[in-house]
Amino acid sequence: MSSESESAGAGRPFTAAELNACLKVLESLVADRALVASVSAEDRRRLLLAAGRVSRLERARAVQRELARAFRKNDRRAQKSADAALLDAVGIRAARREPVFRTPDAPALTPPAAPGPPALAAPPAGPAAEPAPLDAEASEDDPSGPRWPQWNDDPALPVP
């Protein structure tokens, strides 16, 4: 094998001879622009597009980034509009768009009473328990009895 084919296999997609042939064709087209007319329409289009992409490599990458950004932006916009449509279909939002907002009916707190006299509750069975003293300080040993709350329990107020 020649050194040209070895260099093509070492990561380069073309050989030095192919590069020289390409350069020779491009330089001849620059020297005589009328030679482009002798090429078929499809080949001319491919040649001009490829030459433009090579000459403006950064522009091609920028176009790809802009296109990818536009797709992402479109996806976000579609997702946002789908979410908004779902939320607009919710009952309370649809009701608020009406000219007159009617509040939802409150649930009944108690069932309606049956006609007739009210039923009395039966007293609890068993011995009645003694009421607990009102104050923890009161006891059976205290002769004054249980201490009832008074209006002047505040020590800052004078006693009459």
Image: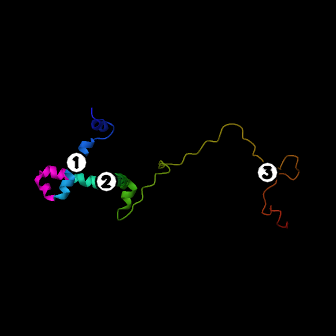
- Assess whether residue 140 is covered by the magenta stretch: no
Q: Please, what secondary structure does the residue beneath circle 1 have? A: helix
Residue 22 circle label: 1
Q: Disc 1 vs disc 2: Cβ atoms closer than 8 Å?
A: no
Out of 86 and 6, give the one closest to the viewer: 6
Q: Given this view, does label 3 or label 1 mark the residue nearer the observer?
A: 1
Read off the residue under disc 2: 57
From the top left corner, tell me how far across and down residue 21 is, in percent. Answer: 21, 46
Crowding around mark 2 (Cα neighbors within 10 Å: few <14, some 14 to 19, many 20+) is few
Left/right placement of residue 125 relative to residue 28 reads right
**Horizontal side, residue 41 vs residue 91: left or right:** left
Which element carries disc 3, helix, strand or loop? loop
Q: Mark 3 sits on what residue?
A: 135
**Stretch in magenta:** 33-47
- Cα distance between the residues tagged 1 and 2: 18 Å
Amino acid type of the residue tagged 2 in the rendering? Leu
Q: CA distance from mark 3 to mark 2?
A: 93 Å
Amino acid residing under circle 1: Cys
- For the N terminus, the image quarter is top left
Give SS at disc 2: helix
Q: What is the residue that sits farthest to the front in this orientation?
A: 2
Residue found at the far top of this picture: 1
Residue in front for this viewpoint, 125 or 54? 54
Residue at the image position 82 percent from the left and 52 percent from the top: 146
